[in-house]
Amino acid sequence: MHRSLQLIARRHYARPAQALDFDVIVIGGGHAGTEACTAAARVGARTLLITQNTDTIGEMSCNPSFGGVGKGVLVREIDALDGVCGRISDLSGIQFKVLNRSKGPAVYGPRAQIDRKIYKRNLQEYLQSYPNLTIKSGSVADLLLSKGETESEFQAIQAKGSKSAVQGIRLEDGQVIRAPNVVITTGTFLGGEIHLGLKVWPAGRINENPSIGLSKSLREAGFRLARLKTGTPPRLDGRTINYEGLEVQRGDDPPSPFSFLHKTLPYADQQILCHQTRTNPEVHQYIEKNFHMSVHIRETVKGPRYCPSLESKIKRFREKAAHTIWLEPEGLDTHLVYPNGISNTMPEDVQLNFLRMIRGLENVDMVQPAYGVEYDHVDPRELRSTLETKRISGLFLAGQINGTTGYEEAAAQGVIAGINAGRHALGLDSFILDRSDAYIGVLIDDLITKGVEEPYRVFTSRSEYRLLLRSDNADLRLTRKGYQAGAVSKERWDKFEKDSNALENAIAALDETRMSPKAWAKAGVTLSSSKLNDNEILTRPEMSLDKLYGVIPSLSQLDDVLKERLVIEGRYKPFLKRQAAEVAALKRDENLKLDINLNYPALNQLSNEIRHKLSVIRPETLGAAKRIEGMTPAAMVVLMRFARRAGTGNQDVSSHSSFDAEQETATSAQ
């Protein structure tokens, strides 16, 4: 750590606890930051949200939408934990559609087209009166750190395997704000620079300054930083688009809300239309001739594989004659249109030229050019499953700083980091979701065990338990856990209890109903088995719930949402039971704890490569170790034996942290 930064840290650490300004500070007002600050506040921590410009809180920097395949499940999970983005999306959505309807509930992808202005206004109004939350504008220059001013503080830091503890922040104007927990959610602002053609300038978003001081602080603290990139398409004037002959995409009727708290949507009767057009070989040839005009497309810095720039699509998929473009209106009272699918970093004149080669855009006017952003991120293998850094106690990271891409991934990390920062401030246990609990657990586990080489996004295919982790049952999986963690309000808990009780009673009624084939036939249902309960009946594709109303009248009293959920539970019950049994068997060994201070170099039974990886990542559980790239079955046997011994307190490999030596070096240097 830089000498001056260490002195600042020590000067401000030695204050009584009551002198702390806040319990938790959240840096950044994007989707990760707004979820983190509200989650910490819900838990009961005195929370500060600090951002460069409070007017941009809730800004949708790129696409005007939430959800999609995989991502929509994340939004539902965030909502089940009483998060913000789902309910604000409902209040601001102007088109709702569930993707993958034909493929089954395990891969349903709830999605909403959002009015940018309404979303930002609704979110800012919601935050203004949020209990335990203070909002302040300011630019953060440094983190304040300490290695412990007393023996007990030093021992507490060492016991966690950390090298120091966060004590607050220093702003660029010199103001110091003290808090023992800090959540960094800087998005693309961390060391950000914008690329437009051959032009490069420092910025985190168009016309907004980057965060340079924090990048320096993190490097000085020893974090491994790398660069990633992303981009956004141009914004078009919808009045200059010819929609005639373009494919139309309509919203669902009726639309389905994201939030479990909502049954209706304010703009359900005003859903907008989206239209589809495509690029063509002429566009591809023209852009390829101008590749030399963009600094952003160099391959030394990775961009998102699954939402690539148009230049990347043309380079990687030369056999494709066309790429899809969705023309998405940005709001109810604006002419701006977002052309989803053509993010690029070509010069402005090149952009306008190729746009006018596309069907429907022959006379289009470009209101804002597309551009790319390159930014710093921290190696997420530096994190615990709580999103607290292993290196610095009390410091949490969430969002693109961890190498992810997308509003939903950022918000999901924000809610977990916020809950844990709040609980850490109050001296409470950690709140952890594993891979069988939620896609949030899949996301975090992938990040902390595998790291990233390119921006990470969630897909349903990343989960081993897709049938259990559906969008419809996110509340059943998570709301009780969130309530027990103090992160769920009484309002949501009451709604959850009402819905879950109604669903449990309906399932029980189905399970308890037994009739002879003759009785079923009289009710209009033909059976081949002499005794078959009604949940087994629902596994048959030709069976619908309304055919059972005569037998179980109470089923007809359920609302439409619960009826659909009951059918899903009944239709997939045999498969759900099988997958639940697999999860239970796996968890018997999966959740065995590993000492984070374990001296892996002393485990001579392991190869040098595996010992090195374990020393870098320091997994918290046997399951996390198993998912490290290159881990072998033989290595797992060694770790399993040690984890079991550690679990009984019979630990025969010394746990020695390099923190001891570093502390001695720091002391002698003084």
Image (tube, grey):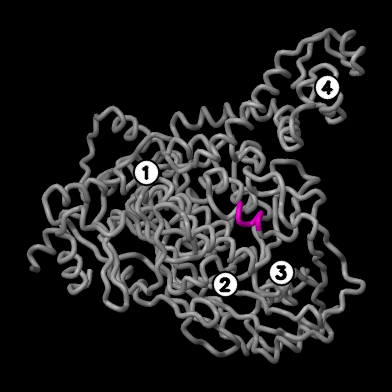
Of badges 2 and 4, nearer the viewer stands 4
Q: Which residues are magenta?
A: 87-91
**Amino acid identity at mark 3:** Gly
Q: Residue furthest bottom?
A: 349
| 399 over 539 or under it: above or below | below
Residue 85 % position (x, y): 58, 55
Q: Which residue is mark 4?
A: 548
Calculate the distance from the C-alpha at mark 3 to the C-alpha at mark 2. 24 Å
Q: Which of these two is toward me, 517 or 10?
A: 10
Of mark 3 and mark 2, the one earlier in the sequence is: 2
Q: Which residue is mark 3?
A: 331
Residue 390 % position (x, y): 32, 53
Q: Which residue is mark 1?
A: 620
Of badges 2 and 1, nearer the viewer stands 2
Calculate the distance from the C-alpha at mark 2 to the C-alpha at mark 4. 52 Å
Residue at 55% across / 40% down in the picture?
A: 492
Of badges 1 and 4, nearer the viewer stands 4
Of badges 3 and 2, nearer the viewer stands 3
Judging from the image, what secondary structure is the residue with disc 1 in? loop
| 277 over 531 or under it: above or below | below
Calculate the distance from the C-alpha at mark 3 to the C-alpha at mark 1. 45 Å
**Amino acid identity at mark 2:** Thr
**Amino acid identity at mark 4:** Leu
Q: Residues within 10 Å of mark 4 (few under 14, many from 20)?
A: many
Q: Residues within 10 Å of mark 2 (few under 14, many from 20)?
A: many
Of mark 4 and mark 3, the one earlier in the sequence is: 3
Quarter-of-image position of residue 391: bottom left
Q: Which of these two is toward me, 442 or 302?
A: 442
